[in-house]
Amino acid sequence: MKNIKFHKNAIKDAALNDNVSEEFILKGIENGTIVLPDNVKRKKKKYYAIGQGLSKKINANIGSSPIHMDVDEEIMKMKVAVRYGAHSVMDLSLGRKIKVIRKKILEYCPVMVGTVPIYETGFELSLKRKDIVEMRIEDFLKTVEEQAKDGVDFMTIHSGVTLNSMERIFKEKRVMDVVSRGGSFLIAWMKYNKKESPLYTYYDEILDILKEYNVTISLGDGLRPGACVDGTDRGQIEELLILGELVDRAREKGVQVMVEGPGHLYLHHIKSNIEIMKRVTHNSPFYVLGPLVNDISAGYDHIASAIGGTLAAYFGADFLCYVTPAEHLKLPDVEDVKEGVLASKIAAFSADLALGKEYAMKRNLEMSKFRKKLDWEKMAKLSIDEKKFREYREKSEVKDSEVCSMCGEFCAVKRLNEITG
């Protein structure tokens, strides 16, 4: 892919953030193994590229629900997500303030912003007392163009949910059927209209709009497994095969493209899922939700996700979508967002460390050296959450400032330092 227009310094800044050359970024964009979401309508303070050979990136989902709409709270979620390490934010808002929230996020967010346009399309129809099954392609294209004009950098489009992939889902008799909101919208539409999905039929028209604004398409996994037992089944794989073909069509149109992945997966399925995805999509950047490695961690799903995300990133996933402690339970609040980002950051860093990324190796080694010296101030600055580090340190009830309250005067590190000088 050539002749893609980026903002001045976007390529340079992305290269500096990953300690690679600008040529490396440009070559990856050209062959489709790297994307740099950068809508022509919105300049950002920070530019990040996603894909092969780069450090792992993190996305944080925010957004209101029809039950709870607070513009200021969503802005705060965005700011907290970025402060703790998110490289992008997706606004998944529903409700009457959806447009206000999106525009405010785009105004204040220093990093790339993504959306799922079918959410807004469905909500707009509901205001007219219509169901999603009454959606026309014009309704959807109008939403896509409006969001593109606002400056959205990447959009999740579920064009791989088709009559064929839907048929395999129902033949498979999954435990959890379909858990993707976008996927369920399209299945309802196809069943009601007895036609092929409009997002598949009119895929070229969607690409034309995205191309005009340089919006990266994130091909959504509308049939992702919502239970580990459903992972890697025929429906999921059929959708992936379709997504592979859609990747080729996006590249031919000059539209940057990445692919979304599962969902809930058994731990031992993660490697094969990454390998199959990379093969089928010709090494497109892979954007994974989790994956969650069990179904019982409600309240702690950020931990289950971090376990799966570490493995996924190590085996080749490029972009980790965080999962918060509120997953499956409620709309995340600001604290949930913080916990989710930190869990994903730990996963991404751990994978980068295992893959020998220079920044990770250096920071990790420095932390160990300062631990040996019992230099708490420098340890605090290197830790993943400096604020929490300092809070815990202040609660350490010891007179000796060199040690903590775990071992006190019996500190192994202090004793060896005294012996060895």
Image (cartoon, rainbow, N blue to C red):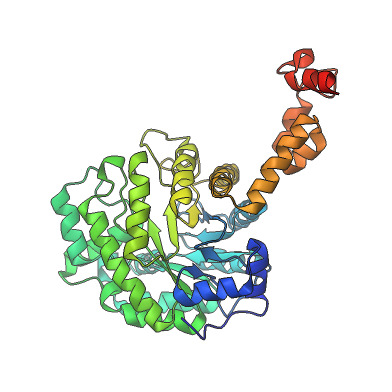
- Residue 216 in percent (x, y) is at 47, 72
Identify which residue is drawn at 31% across, 41% down.
Answer: 228
Reply above or below: 93 against 391.
below
The answer to which of 62 and 395 lies nearer the viewer is: 395
- Residue 46 in percent (x, y) is at 66, 66
- Residue 397 in percent (x, y) is at 78, 18
Identify which residue is drawn at 76% across, 24% down.
Answer: 395
The answer to which of 262 and 83 lies nearer the viewer is: 262
> Can I make out residue 139 in this image?
no
Reply above or below: 122 against 372.
below
Identify which residue is drawn at 76% across, 38% down.
Answer: 380
Q: Residue furthest front?
A: 420
Q: Residue furthest top?
A: 410
The quadrant in which residue 400 appears is top right
Identify which residue is drawn at 28% across, 46% down.
Answer: 231
| Relative side of 6 to 376, left or right | left
The quadrant in which residue 297 appears is top left
Q: How many marks?
A: 0
Reply above or below: 131 against 327.
below
| Relative side of 152 to 172, left or right | right
- Residue 64 in percent (x, y) is at 50, 55
Q: Quadrant of the C terminus?
A: top right
> Can I make out residue 309 in this image?
yes
The quadrant in which residue 260 appears is bottom left
